[in-house]
Amino acid sequence: MSDQTQPDSPAAQPPADGEKMVFQAEVNQLLQLMIHSLYSNQEIFLRELISNGSDACDKLRFESIADSSLLEDDTELRITVSVDEEAKTVTVTDNGIGMNRDEVIANIGTIAKSGTRQFLDSLTGDQKTDAKLIGQFGVGFYSAFVVADSVTLVSRKAGESADQAVMWVSDASGGYTLNSAERAERGTEITLHIKDECKDFLNAYRLRSVIKKYSDHITFPIMMMGEVPPVPPAAEGDDEPAPEPQEARLEQVNAASALWTRPKSSIEDEEYQTFYKQVCNDYEDALTWAHNKVEGNQEYTSLLFIPKKAPFDLYDGNHQRNGIKLFVQRVFIMDEAEKLMPRYLRFVRGLVDSNDLPLNVSREILQDNKIIDAIRSASVKRVLGMLEKLAEKQPEDYASFWTEFGACLKEAPGEDFGNKEQVAKLYRFDTTHADKAGELTGLDDYIARMKQGQDKIFYITADGYQAARNSPHMEIFRDKGIEVLLMHDRVDEWMMSYLHEYEGKSFVSIAKGDLDLSAIEGVDAESDEEKAEKEKKAADVAPTIERIKKVLSDSTSDVRASTRLTSSPACVVMGEHDMALHMQQLLKQAGHELPSSKPVLEVNPTHPILDLMDNEQDDERFGDWAHLLLDQALLADGGQLEDSAGFVKRMNEMFLALRS
Ligand code: ADP
């Protein structure tokens, strides 16, 4: 047994002064990973600590709106970075909200966020990507150990007295020590004892350049000690007394300007990109952005970015994050202002700065607020407009956007009725018009290619590109050269249950309901003989169809002659409002109870198997044929057979029968 205490175990007593605590297992693992994975990107430790300091200042500024006494007489919030070459330390100090003892234990000794496990699992070994993940998961503080062999944090919470401070010390070897401490100022001071191999961080120039690079837009001043100006040598024969050596003073290193408040025309693309990376925590440039200042009835500025890559958990059911920060009159109010963007646009990052909201807004107030509603609906339009423009002007960038975020947009029809059409304009699908997967088309282009007399948009859903493309339902469309959209994303079936038309053209699944293509030019252009021939065939197979119907009465709702098939012997057709088979399958596997909907079996009157069956006197053999027809049709449609062994047995018997 160890005599150390696990801070996260429920039975643990609050640690006594000087008691050695062990890190939560995850913290340990994280530390080791971080130290090893970030060695070529060490400088980000400073960005992370400054960002924490800035958050702490934001929190204090926000709380002081309600209770101004928290600020005492220290009202200029700032972050200070200092270096001591002799002691080999770098210190980052803020006069923000600070932490009390419990908060230090909760925030710095454990990882409360459930995402940690996922974080660890998602590390790729690629340093750039992993560095980005560290930002996303908010495990920033521990990056101090990338450059430091020990870290001392002293913190005093705003509103508490000087002797209520707490000191946390760790050398990353598995635990930390807590002690009561004294601290004259409120806020947090973090001192890193820099490792020998990282001693270039003990250079003030280096630190300044790192601050400029990553933290220029932090809205609080970041201060460093300035250079002491050299004393000019006294001129010969000069009687003037030599000037006093000047004292070094703190100087502000960052520009600290709220970029979004500047006029658009004065901002370079490069500045937007740097801002994006700093504020939205991405290591890559943004794909595109929109910066808008709205004046009039309402006054606000929005700066909205589309990232290049989706965060790995964007499609997790419980992904609740939202990338929009809310500011009121340039004061940061909250992260993840979920009221500002609908869920299907959760990948958009950036900020909204309102001049109309009260400074003391809370999430509750935002719930039902006209100002917010108006900002939100205008912001949605902005994002959709920006994407439309991207699709038009930079189709390649749009294609990569679609790969990353298309599935998110597909959630829109179920969520945002009002913008359905505008979102649908952005959709891209595989199509029979192209030769291979990945050459996607939009709905406008589909419509432009529609045949004379065609007033519907035909599509098929399946669980893969090949399954869609080779589906028996496709045969008549292939024959007649009618384009079909190939939808093989999981959300497609669900999306289509909300999306009924686009530009006045209704969507029709080629695998559902009755199919009537007669109005389309070129479809009915059969010679009279061909027609007569077909009708004769249909009349010929009518008795066979009746026989099949009897055999399959339990598993089908009807059996009929098909107008869809030209080469396959049979296919199953779902009712117009039924769910596609492959979807039913998926939901069943996930344990959902579904009302059973029996498919219609359509058979191809021109197929030789039907002739064979027509001549089959043996009822048992005929039954086998009928089951084989249904089973193969189900398989081709992504369904699963209830009796797959029976299918294989029948098939083999048929093969053997060929011998005789
Ligand atoms: P994140 O900042 O993403 O939450 P960190 O590991 O960097 O993750 O910090 C964990 C928590 O510790 C923060 O959420 C915050 O509550 C607290 N914290 C870190 N640094 C400071 C600081 N300088 N002042 C006050 N609280 C801090």
Image (cartoon, rainbow, N blue to C red):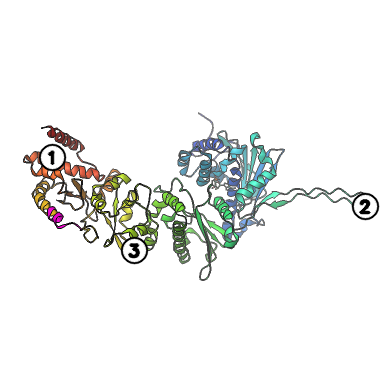
Per the image, label 2 sits on a secondary structure element best described as loop
Q: As shown in the figure, which amino acid type bears the numbered disc 1?
A: Asp
Residue lying at the far top of the rendered structure: 1
Quadrant position of the C terminus in the picture? top left
- Residue 405, given in percent of the width and then of the height, sits at 42, 51
Direction from residue 93 to residue 280 in the image, left or right: left
The stretch in magenta equals: 525-533
Mark 1 and mark 2: Cα distance apart in space? 120 Å
Q: How many marks?
A: 3
State whether label 1 is within 8 Å of ligand 1: no
First reached walking from the N terminus: tag 1 or tag 2: 2
Q: List the residue tagged with mark 2.
A: 239
First reached walking from the N terminus: tag 3 or tag 1: 3
Which residue appears at 59% of the width and 51% of the height? 54
Per the image, label 3 sits on a secondary structure element best described as loop
Mark 3 and mark 1: Cα distance apart in space? 47 Å
> For mark 2, does the 10 Å Cα neighbourhood hold few (<14), some (14 to 19), or many (20 or more) residues?
few
- Residue 211, given in percent of the width and then of the height, sits at 63, 48
State whether label 3 is within 8 Å of ligand 1: no
* Res 407 visible: yes
- Label 3 with label 2: CB-CB less than 8 Å: no
Q: As shown in the figure, which amino acid type bears the numbered disc 3?
A: Glu
First reached walking from the N terminus: tag 3 or tag 2: 2
Q: As shown in the figure, which amino acid type bears the numbered disc 2?
A: Asp
Tell which of 239 and 64 is nearer to you.
239
The label number, if any, that marks residue 2 in the structure image: none
Mark 3 and mark 2: Cα distance apart in space? 90 Å
The label number, if any, that marks residue 503 in the structure image: 3
Q: List the residue tagged with mark 1.
A: 624
Which residue appears at 48% of the width and 57% of the height? 337
* Res 58 visible: no
Tell which of 104 and 340 is nearer to you.
340
